[in-house]
Amino acid sequence: MKLDRALDLMREVPDFPRPGVVFRDLTPVFADPDALRAVVDGLQGGIDPDTQVVAAIESRGFLLGAALGYGWGYGVVPLRKPGKLPAVAHRVSYALEYGEATLELPAEAVLPGQRVVVVDDVLATGGTAAAACELVEAAGGVVTGVSVVLEIPGLGGRERLGGRRVDALLAV
């Protein structure tokens, strides 16, 4: 399946999670094996070849990160919401479009000098991706880029990432 056909499976859900917001739901893409393969292959094409680890943002980033790790031999590190990890190396709180959130990095998951790509489904305002980059760098990792399926350029997320490489399969 071609990538554009795979991304056509994305569903738009109006007024979620609040009135006036159009949520881009990638569940139908993930549920179709050929579409999932096309998306993961598309993401891989934008990842720096010297990358060693995928930092996968909770929760849809986990799906993409696990597939990338398995398919291309990367280690996978989950960046989790608070209270989910038994040992936390670093924690970052940040602003979201709809409030505040916190991400945590597991202890000893990213080693100093490791080359890490941050992966998620959507780049919107950039708060989550910026927090993920901060976590990786606090552990001594080197962020090789941020890879997402969908970018919403009008929300300015790319600008919050301080000139880091950003690869998005689709911008809406």
Image: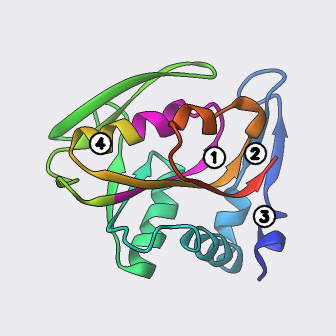
Q: Residue 43 sits in which quadrant?
A: bottom right
Crowding at dot 2, Cα within 10 Å, few <14 / some 14-19 / many 20+, comes out as: some
> For residue 163, which numbered disc appears in the image?
none
Disc 4 target residue:
137
Residue 148 located within the stretch drawn in magenta: no
Asked whether the residues under the numbered discs 2 and 3 touch, taking CB atoms below 8 Å apart as contact, a structural biologist would say: no
Disc 3: which residue: 7
Mark 4 vs mark 2: in front: 4
* Residue holding disc 1: 122
The amino acid pointed to by label 4 is Glu
- The amino acid on which the numbered mark 2 sits, given as a three-letter code, is Arg
Q: Residue at x 84, y 72 (%)?
A: 5
Of callouts 2 and 3, which one flags the residue occurring earlier in the amino acid sequence? 3
Amino acid under label 1?
A: Val
Q: Earlier in the sequence, mark 4 or mark 2?
A: 2
Between discs 1 and 3, the one toward the N terminus: 3
- Is there any visible trace of residue 107 in the rendered image? yes
Spatial CA span between label 4 and label 2: 29 Å
Q: Which residue is mark 2?
A: 24
Determine whether label 1 and label 2 are within 8 Å by CB. yes
> Does the residue at mark 3 contact the one at mark 4 (Cβ under 8 Å)?
no
Q: Counting residues from the N terminus, which is met first, the one under dot 4 or under dot 1?
A: 1
Quadrant in the picture for residue 144? bottom left
Q: Residues within 10 Å of mark 1 (few under 14, many from 20)?
A: many
> x and y percent of residue 3 in the render?
76, 73
In the rendered image, which quarter contains the N terminus? bottom right
Q: Which dot, 1 or 2, sits closer to the camera?
A: 1
* In this view, the mark in front (3 or 4): 4
**Which range of residues does the magenta coloring cover?**
116-132
